[in-house]
Amino acid sequence: MTKINSLSSTSPVQRPENRPVKTPVAAEKPQTRETLDTGQIRNRIIHWFAQAGLKPARITGLEESLEKKTQRHRKVLQQRKLQNLERILDLAMEYSPNKEVGEEALDPDWFFNYIRMAEDIYSPAMQELWAKILAVEVGQPGTFSMRSLSTLTQLTQKDAKVFRTAVSLASRRRGDFSPRILYGYTIKPSLLSVLSLKRGQQLNLAQFGLAYPDLLSLMDLGLIYSTEIESGELDNKKRSEWRICGETLQLSARRSGTVLTYYKFTSTGAELFRLVSGKPHDTYLQALRNMLQGAFDIY
């Protein structure tokens, strides 16, 4: 399991004898985010509830009946849901997936479930993702499962950002559909060296923007599997081809008993992986190369 490095403690500094002790100076207060007064917080609360057609009772008073308030609330929500769908429709029309169009017709059940979920997508960034899904599914029905759509409704903008980081670190082995995030390797002891211990190396993914809490979040969402995975023992007489951060690498293990360790995307994560354009992480690629050179010949 990837571990986050803790800060190493240092030994205390020895103070020379007979040297006067200076009075400690009060530490400078760290900069904090701008605080909001009560009035500003209230105004923000009012602003957001207004997006749902609601106003504080002290503003509406008694001039509006409960029925009128209910009608306004429903009307505003219906209008916003309609605007969400119109925005997604416009974005889908602009997106052109470079793939052949299949002959199979779009599943009506899939489409109307999609509409039911998409009308509650308010974030512009997430609307763009939903538009891409629709465009791809219309051209190639069956590409995205209902499970993927259901998972997508749970994603916040922060979750989407974390997932994009994961995509930027992902690798795919030739002939394998599921992306993985490589982070280490292990060399198992051979039968002839029973007393030898496992050897290997690991990268700290937090150094590349994917901290362990981020991995836990992706696990909870069902986008990557909840445990680290080891590959089978690699044949040291064959090369395996990987597409990593935009580059193709061929790896050949120098010793038998060598396995790769990684986090693997689930089927839902693999489906959404196809839509998210993560920028290749050059720093991670170089660190991965340097680590793998300890056990692999890289071509």
Image (cartoon, grey):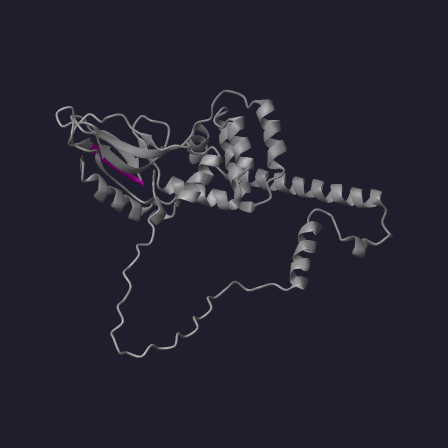
- Which residue corresponds to the image point at 52% horizontal and 28% vertical from the top-left? 147
* Residue furthest to the front: 18
Q: In the figure, is residue 114 to the left or right of 228? A: right
Q: In the figure, is residue 274 to the left or right of 78? A: left
Q: In the figure, is residue 61 to the left or right of 187? A: right
Q: Quadrant of residue 18?
A: bottom left
Residue 10 at x, y percent in the picture: 28, 59
Please determine whether, in this image, residue 50 is positioned above or below residue 259: below
For the residue pair 171 and 247, the one nearer the viewer reads as 171
Quick check: is 250 in the magenta stretch? yes
Please determine whether, in this image, residue 127 is positioned above or below residue 146: below
Please determine whether, in this image, residue 55 is positioned above or below residue 75: below
Residue 275 at x, y percent in the picture: 45, 36
Q: Quadrant of residue 183?
A: top left
Please determine whether, in this image, residue 149 is positioned above or below residue 82: above
For the residue pair 44 and 242, the one nearer the viewer reads as 44
- Which residue corresponds to the image point at 51% horizontal and 26% vertical from the top-left? 145
Decide whether the magenta segment is chiefly helix, strand or loop: strand
The N terminus: image quadrant:
top left
* Residue furthest to the top: 104
Residue 110 at x, y percent in the picture: 57, 25
Q: Quadrant of residue 116?
A: top right
Quick check: is 96 in the magenta stretch? no
Chain part drawn in magenta = 245-251
For the residue pair 31 and 197, the one nearer the viewer reads as 197
Residue 226 at x, y percent in the picture: 42, 32
> How many labels, in total?
0
The C terminus: image quadrant:
top left
